[in-house]
Image (spheres, grey):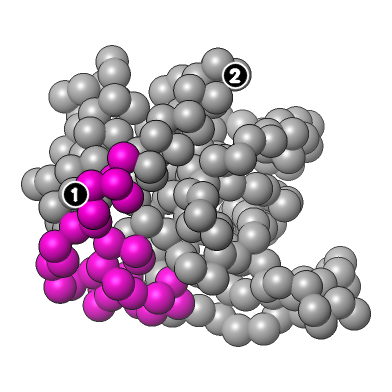
Amino acid sequence: LRSNHKYILETHLPDIGSRMSKDWFLVRPVGRPNVNSILLTMVPVSQHCQLNLQGGDKHVLKQLLSSLEHPYVHNFIDIDYIPDKRLVVIMEPFCQRGSLKDLIYHTTPSMSWSTKYSVRRSGLRLNQVQSLGRQVLEAISFLHNLDFCPIGQIQSGNIYLEGSRCKLSGFDNSILGYKPRIQRLTRQFQTNIDSAQFGHLIYELGSGRELT
């Protein structure tokens, strides 16, 4: 933020997600007070990352993610890399309604992960599960047709709510080498991990708790 002067810091959020060593911030474009907040995250580069983030790979990845346009795929704004800190920086729209997990547990996205999902809920209505599940399937199909296969990051915390739509995100984590939080639950399905993760998602939507 200090180097490009395009954005100003609004707030440093608590640990709203489950990934360790990750920081979440809300920023806003300079001189545009009426523009919605942008979510900026910083996380150490994964030891499994095979990209050269100091070279052309970063620009190719940015172009690729920016080119994805689908009603049920979350938008992407920017990616950067801080070499002296070995930090990956991602910028994306901040969704005020939060994620599907926030909807299931009746929480707000700015609350800490360690507290906001501690109370089991009763799950969503059948028609909600059907509608949201169909939207997620359409997003998965779109990404698979573009050879994003497997996506490997399909879970309720990676699916944001925007109006009546839900939008799949998190697929950049797989490209950058980050392992999914529910990997231990689906590792036996590595040849068809997206189907297994989608099944876990539907169970959580309908029951109000994760399948363990």
* Coordinates of residue 168 in the picture (x, y in percent): 49, 43
Q: Which mark is first along the chain, 2 or 1?
A: 2
Q: Say if residue 179 shows up in the picture.
A: no
Residue drawn where x is 78% and y is 73% of the image: 35
Q: Say if residue 160 shows up in the picture.
A: yes
Q: Quadrant of the N terminus?
A: bottom right
Say whether residue 161 is left or right of residue 152: right
Residue that extends furthest to the front in the rendered view of this protein:
127
Question: Which quarter of the figure has residue 121?
Answer: bottom left
Q: Amino acid at mark 2?
A: Leu
Q: Nearer the viewer, residue 1 or 204?
A: 204
The residue beneath circle 2 is 146
Residue drawn where x is 32% and y is 50% of the image: 128
Question: Which quarter of the figure has residue 84?
Answer: bottom right
Q: How many marks?
A: 2
The secondary element bearing badge 1 is classed as helix
Q: Is residue 11 above or below residue 99?
A: below
Determine the CA span between mark 1 and mark 2. 29 Å
Q: Is residue 47 above or below residue 7?
A: above
Q: Amino acid at mark 1?
A: Gly
Q: Residues within 10 Å of mark 1 (few under 14, many from 20)?
A: some
Disc 1 versus disc 2: nearer the observer: 1
* Coordinates of residue 56 in the picture (x, y in percent): 78, 32
Residue drawn where x is 69% and y is 36% of the image: 69
Residue drawn where x is 71% and y is 72% of the image: 36
Q: Nearer the viewer, residue 10 or 159?
A: 159
- Disc sitting over residue 206 in the figure: 1
Q: Which range of residues does the magenta coloring cover?
A: 102-130
Question: Which quarter of the figure has residue 189?
Answer: top left
Q: Is residue 112 above or below residue 52?
A: below
